[in-house]
Image (spheres, rainbow, N blue to C red):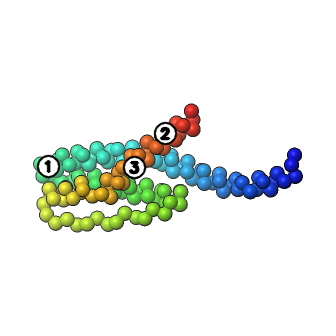
Amino acid sequence: MNAHAPRYVASLELPRRIERASRALAYIGLMIPLGALGLLAIAAIALGALVSIVGLGGPLALAVRAARRLAELDRRAANRLLDAHIPPLPGRARVAGGAWRRTRHALADRQVRLGLAALCLGGGEAVAMIVERVA
């Protein structure tokens, strides 16, 4: 056995690496249900947009609010578990006008679209990572 082996082992910083790996695994495990909820939020937004055509904007407003909360949960989890330093989403702008104008504004909100895309892609990515490691 090499006399310098303990120094090489210490230079690997295994406890720090194991702790970071466990945080990454926790984030991957959290992304699976968040990704599924993201898909449901996309379906709810699509359904809410269809219902808002007839003048009922309430379901769309609830779906967009749920999508923003999911994106915020994902951001907080990434910041806490991965030290990602992702800034919070900007506040929503109030839109004057009828239900149709508010619906169009909600569907055009870039932050909501990006957040939903990240949630959906992140959930699929988490499943792919787990399948890759198991196989």
Residue type, numbered disc 1:
Ile
Query: Helix, strand, or loop for circle 1?
Result: loop
CB under 8 Å between discs 1 and 2:
no
Q: Position of residue 33 (x, y in %)?
A: 43, 45
Tell me, yes or no, if residue 33 can be seen here. no
Which of disc 1 and disc 3 is earlier in sequence?
A: 1
Q: Quadrant of residue 68?
A: bottom left
- Report helix, strand or loop for mark 3: helix
**Residue 14, percent from left and from top:** 70, 53
Q: CA distance from mark 3 to mark 1?
A: 26 Å
Q: Is residue 47 left or right of residue 133?
A: left
> Badge 1: few (under 14), some or many (20 or more) residues near its Cα, within 10 Å?
few
Q: CA distance from mark 3 to mark 2?
A: 14 Å
The numbered mark at residue 28 is: none
Q: In this figure, which residue is indicated by the disc labeled 3?
A: 119
* Residue type beneath disc 3: Leu
Give the foreground label among 1 and 2: 2
Q: Residue at x 24, y 54 (%)?
A: 107
Q: Residues within 10 Å of mark 2 (few under 14, many from 20)?
A: few
The disc labelled 2 sits on which kind of residue? Ala
Badge 3 or badge 2: first in the primary sequence: 3
Q: CA distance from mark 1 to mark 2?
A: 37 Å
Could you say where residue 36 lies in the image, as x and y percent from the top left?
39, 43
Which residue is drawn at the image coordinates 65% and 51% (left, top)? 18
Q: What residue sits 27% from the left and 46% below the top?
A: 44
Q: Name the residue that disc number 2 marks.
A: 128
Q: Is residue 130 visible?
A: yes
Q: Specify few, some or many for label 3: CA neighbours under 10 Å numbering under 14, 14-19, or 20 or more.
A: many
Q: Where, quadrant-wise, is the C terminus in this rendering?
A: top right
Q: Quadrant of residue 134?
A: top right
Residue 101: percent from left, percent from top: 15, 59
Provide the residue designation for mark 1.
Answer: 53
